[in-house]
Amino acid sequence: MATVPRNAPCPCGSGKKFKNCCLPKNSDHTDTSQTSPLSEKTAVAYKAMSEKKWDQAICEFKEYLNENPSSFEILQAIAGCYDGAEDYLMAAEFHEKSLALSDGES
């Protein structure tokens, strides 16, 4: 049996997306991103960011960054947190780091 993509219509015919219907019941389909400890850390960080808890979000993102130093998205998120906290000098520093990283990938 072929693996059904998460966002595809559910093969049961309900009209819902697979992820909202039979995915939780389907033991053959595993989604490792939901169980990864690193994705949990970023989820906590993004939640703190959405609640404008800038210092907490920055700490969580930096912890993730220590394990994944070349993460463009995390560098951008940290810059966004510093922007939110109105620490524009630090925001600029992290924007520059992310730009340097993206320039190295092209």
Image (cartoon, rainbow, N blue to C red):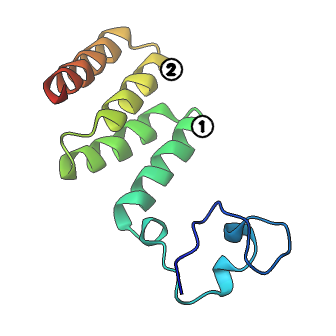
The answer to whether residue 22 is left or right of residue 32 is right
Q: Residue at x 57, y 66 (%)?
A: 5
Residue 41 picture quarter: bottom left
Residue 101 picture quarter: top left
Q: Which label number is shown at residue 22?
A: none
The answer to whether residue 27 is left or right of residue 20 is left
Question: In which quadrant is the N terminus drawn?
Answer: bottom right
User: What is the number of callouts on the image?
Assistant: 2
Q: Which label number is shown at residue 84?
A: 2
**Circle 2 — which element?**
helix
Q: Position of residue 91 (x, y in %)?
A: 35, 16
The disc labelled 1 sits on which kind of residue? Ser
Q: Residue at x 18, y 42 (%)?
A: 69
Q: Disc 1 or 2, which lies upstream in sequence?
A: 1
Q: Residue at x 18, y 30 (%)?
A: 105
Circle 2 crowding by C-alpha within 10 Å: few under 14, some 14–19, many from 20: some
Circle 1 crowding by C-alpha within 10 Å: few under 14, some 14–19, many from 20: few
- Distance between the alpha carbons at the discs numbered 1 and 2: 10 Å
The disc labelled 2 sits on which kind of residue? Gly
Q: Position of residue 40 (x, y in %)?
A: 44, 61
Query: Compared to 37, does 2 lie above or below?
Result: below
Q: Which label number is shown at residue 50?
A: 1
The answer to whether residue 69 is left or right of residue 64 is left
Q: Position of residue 67 (x, y in %)?
A: 20, 53
The foreground one among 2 and 91 is: 2
Q: Are marks 1 and 2 in contact (CB under 8 Å)?
A: no
The foreground one among 2 and 52 is: 2
